[in-house]
Image: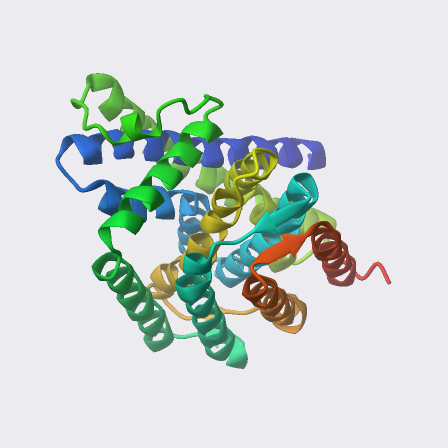
Amino acid sequence: MLIFWIVVFILSLALLVKGADWLIVSAEKIGLAMGLSPFIVGVTIVGVGTSFPELISSFVAAFKGVPDVVVANAVGSNIANILLIVGISAVIGKRLVVTKSLIDLDLPLLSISTVLLLGVAWDMQVTLGESILLLVTYGIYLLYTVMHKDIDHEAAGITEVLSSRVERKGHIVAHEQEALVPQKITVKDIALLIIGILGLVIGAKYLIDALVNLSTMLDIGTGVIAITAVAVGTSLPELLVSAKAALLKKSEVALGNIFGSNVFNGMVVIGLPGLLGTLPVDSQTFLIGLPAMGFATLLFVISGISRQIHLWEGMFYLSLYVLFLAKLFNWF
């Protein structure tokens, strides 16, 4: 029975991630075909899309009576995004160089969102009022990003984001600007959109079912599984994009999606399910996960200030992630 639920966990996680991929690809085309600006499509659909697995799985967890999974999932994803994904990217790319424009806006926003999340979770629960605060904060962040992006940055930024999405599909981007040309909405696009949504819902349902059963069989808290296996699994899209971008020496792409994903995880992945009721923070997430997330973000900010992340820093990030896992599972 244990093997059965492990297989269900892996398959549902794969369906969840793939469903998000289908949803984003079709939604991009439909959004552009409907006349939405490329930047708006990038910020809303592309920028948020890779965090759909975390959001849907958190919603399902809240509905199925395991609300402690929500915060653990978001915190674990943020830790994995920085220590694991940035670490691997730095090792692959040897050195990641960050542009100044990224530092001026994204690092402060990431810091503010992290501090806010730490403050909200300080009493080991996220209440309805705190969830609303997180969502309002994200709304302000999104509005600020949309209103203050100049035309040059808009063109460069959306091209970069869209091209990274194409690269994730395994294609070579020969003419990045072609991704910005509006296309007609086809039956295939609509079908892919529906299949993507169904993949997300079905994958999330069975993922949470498997998580609950595995935690019972292995006598491990659902929060611990969520902060590790679920968090890493739902962060695979970011890992694939960043690792390939680092290999191609595109540091901005390797790091850019981490900022938006972490802010979204902390504000929306917790905020929206929190509208359904108070979200508890399990002891492992509170004692180990939150401090680890705060420390990882601090290291990332320090690395960002220097505008580059070296190979040795990437190895240090990875060693910290191993230490985090070891502490979480009481290996020492």
Q: Quadrant of residue 156?
A: top left
Along the viewing direction, whichever of 222 and 181 lies nearer the viewer: 181
Residue 268 on image: x %, y %: 37, 60
Q: With respect to residue 63, does 245 lie above or below?
A: above
Question: Residue 122 vs residue 150: left or right?
Answer: right
Residue 39 on image: x %, y %: 25, 45
Give the residue at the far top of this rendering. Answer: 187
Quadrant in which residue 141 is drawn:
bottom left
Along the line of sight, the residue nearer the viewer: 8 or 181: 181
Q: Is residue 293 visible?
A: yes
Horizontally, residue 154 falls left or right of residue 186, namely right
Residue 249 percent coordinates (x, y): 57, 38
Instruction: Give 166 or 265, whichever is nearer the viewer.
Output: 166
> Where's the C terminus, which quadrant?
bottom right
Left or right, residue 272 beside residue 298: left
**Horizontal side of residue 313 vs 246, given as left or right:** right
The residue nearer to you, when weighing 277 against 263, is: 263
At a point 24% along the width and 62% down the height, the residue shown is: 148
